[in-house]
Image: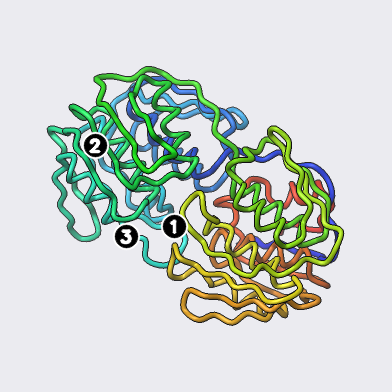
Amino acid sequence: MSRYIIQGGRKIEGRIRISGAKNSVLPIFAATILNGSENIIHDCPDLKDMEIMIELLKILGCNVKKEGNTVIIDSSGEIKHEVPDSLVRKMRSSIVLLGALLSRLKKANICFPGGCDIGPRPIDLHLKGLEQLGVKINESHGTIFCEAPDLKGTEIHLDYPSVGATENIILAAVFAKGITIIRNAAKEPEIADLQSFLNKSGAQISGAGTNNIRIEGVESLNPVEHTIIPDRIVAGTYLIAGAATSGNIELENVNIEHIQPMIAKLKESGCILRTGQNSVKLNVKNKLRAIDTIRTLPYPGFPTDLQAPIMALLSKAKGTSVIIETVFENRFKHVEDLICMGANIKVDGRIAVIRGRNKLMGANVIARDLRGGAALVVAGLCAEGTTVVEDIEHIDRGYENFHVNLQSIGADIIRE
């Protein structure tokens, strides 16, 4: 297992280009199965999760080539309908292959997915929506067996605006007869990027980014060349790191609209932010202030994926902050390690109360999940002394060249 060694207390200053969005590239990779053609995808982040998805596509029958941050996926060959358990259990996002395979092959077998252990994330909404399209589903010994001989458009109301369920239903409905309407759909920018990719290929989808998405079934799709949107979570993490170290940083290749919830909270804490067309600059001149309340919500609310990193920041802010985690049940695993570094945090169920301290101290800590691991890196950057973050393979799942980028803006961080 690898680890980061961080010498804290240094301001980070400089410029970073934000990579393509992990949560966009994975469903778009799955969507390449639909058109049976060669697809060229630009600005793909070099991540462990992307490697897993590429391996899955190869096993299913796709020809995949990687040239820098461009990935070429040829799905014109014979595609298998059985997704291997060993890889699916490593990455929750692999469940989106279900909708893609059902759309193209009318059948699919897949086990229940894995990923970060941050509480129950049932796929009931996925299966319920697919059943309404006409998919016949059987579950046995942890595997889902699906057949869809006659997919038909219908109106589907999601009980919760699940990103994964919305993506799976969109993919399954592309070739369905008639019109499918998804009510209470997820509004995340990554959904809109999936719509953009599919529409370039010839799909008839509208409404992504709103509560209601409309899919009119088509008979075939065409090859696509597409560029992935910037990763708003990665952008938010670097902004938080800059703020935590009282730094001065500029991010390029960002979509300002996508990071507005983060910008608003950082301004509330006393950061100075200036936005350009595709860039944002952050500067900190005074001690950061506590933020009264942060409530994680689906987009356009404050993202649950930035709850842990901003908690690390607030551990050094002046005053008391409250974070309410409404999306996942078990997303405070990083608290124990932050406390080891001197943070004053009390957790009661889904509520964390953070009383800011003047300083954090370096410690040996463990990355227990992706975003919690990023939070510990943020804490290490602003702590006094040496911080060692173990099990950083979790962090590799969501951040491309994390320590290299941080080194480029002045952080004292190495990987062993």
The answer to whether residue 155 is seen in the rendering is: yes
Q: In which quarter of the image is the C terminus?
A: bottom right
Tell me which corner region of the image, top left, top right, bottom left or bottom right, holds residue 305: bottom right
Q: What's the CA distance linking mark 3 and mark 1?
A: 12 Å
> With 411 as the anchor, is 311 left or right in this view?
left
Could you tell which of marks 2 and 1 lies nearer the N-terminus?
Answer: 2
Tell me which corner region of the image, top left, top right, bottom left or bottom right, holds residue 216: top left
Residue at numbered disc 3: 122
Along the line of sight, the residue nearer the viewer: 355 or 291? 291
> With 235 as the anchor, is 80 left or right in this view?
left
Looking at the picture, which amino acid does disc 1 mark? Gly
Along the line of sight, the residue nearer the viewer: 376 or 237? 237
Could you tell which of marks 3 and 2 lies nearer the N-terminus?
Answer: 2
Q: In which quarter of the image is the N terminus?
A: bottom right
Looking at the picture, which amino acid does disc 2 mark? Leu
User: Relative to 243, does residue 98 appear above or below in the rendering?
Assistant: above
* Residues packed near mark 3 inside 10 Å, few (<14), some (14 to 19) or many (20 plus): few
Image coords of residue 222 (percent x, y): 37, 17
Residue at numbered disc 1: 115
User: Relative to 131, does residue 8 appear above or below in the rendering?
Assistant: below
Tell me which corner region of the image, top left, top right, bottom left or bottom right, holds residue 218: top left
Residue at numbered disc 2: 102
Q: What's the CA distance linking mark 3 and mark 2?
A: 20 Å
Image coords of residue 343 (percent x, y): 69, 78
Element assignment for label 3: loop
Image coords of residue 35 (percent x, y): 34, 23
Element assignment for label 1: loop
Give the label, 3 or 1, closer to the camera.
3
Residue sitting at x 24%, y 59%: 142
Give the label, 3 or 2, closer to the camera.
3
> With 232 as the anchor, is 226 left or right in this view?
left
